[in-house]
Amino acid sequence: MRLPSLSALALIVLLSACAEQPAATVTPPTPSPVIGLPGKVVRTDGNQDLQLIERGAARCNLITAEEIGRALIATNNARAGQGLKPLQINRSAQAAAEAQACDMANRGTMTHAGSATKGPSARIKAQGYKPTVTAENIAAGRFNLDQATMEWVASPKHLANIVIPGLKDFGTAYATGADGKTGFHVAVYAQPR
């Protein structure tokens, strides 16, 4: 099934990409005041946290095996287009993605910094994974994971994370914020030691 074009869907999308080596440290920036969702696709540099909705109780752990599978297929198709080996689902990467999606949704903030972690490397390490490289793509808006994955593949900065040579592992998740409408999406890409 072919999805309709993004312009036809009039999506509200915010995207950010982050790649880091395990030794990298990031000082979490202060979130901006609640800005609300813009009416178009906006790509950020990932250097500023964006408070999109008010904090509150999120709906977490919503992703299904079918959704993970579709995201993995789209991700591996992008990698194949660059002559790279496919990724596989990894429990630690999946748990790190789920934790960050839920954390962002509870805070109503799109950010690579977690409430208790500085970035994706710390989150995957907390799951017992020993990374050489960790990268993360995030998105927030009123759309589903398939659409977020399509945006990541279409965005040069996000695609750069997807096609890092040597990556082996993948996890993805989303959670819905307290407004019941805004999805917070995360994909984690990793290479073990």
Image (tube, helix red, strand yellow):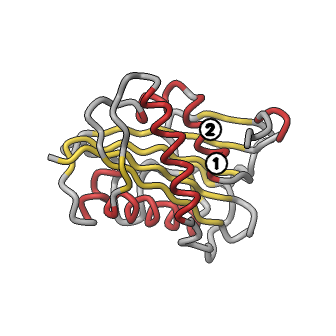
Q: Residue at x 52, y 67 (%)?
A: 102
Residue 6 position in % (x across, y down): 76, 35
Q: Residue furthest bottom?
A: 57
43 or 164, which is in the foreground? 164
Q: Are marks 2 and 1 in contact (CB under 8 Å)?
A: yes
Q: Residues within 10 Å of mark 1 (few under 14, many from 20)?
A: some
Residue 42 in which image quadrant: top right
Marks 2/1: CA–CA distance: 6 Å
Viewer-side residue, 185 vs 43? 185
- Residue 75 lies, in percent from the top left, at 48, 39
Q: Split into 4 quadrants, where in the image is the N terminus?
A: top right
**Residue beneath disc 1:** 146
Residue 55, placed above or below residue 42: below
Q: Does residue 118 lie above or below 82 as drawn? A: below
| Tag 2 residue | 150
- Give the residue drawn at x 26%, y 34%: 166
- Helix, strand or loop under label 1: helix
- How far across and how far down the image is residue 59, in percent? 62, 74
Amino acid under disc 2: Met
Residue 55 picture quarter? bottom right
Query: Which residue sits furthest left?
Result: 193
Q: Is residue 125 above or below residue 7?
A: below
User: Are there few (<14), some (14-19), or many (20+) residues within 10 Å of tag 2?
Assistant: some
Judged from the image, the secondary structure of the residue bearing numbered disc 2 is helix
Q: Position of residue 155 (x, y in %)?
A: 57, 28
Which residue corresponds to the image point at 67% horizontal and 45% vertical from the top-left? 147
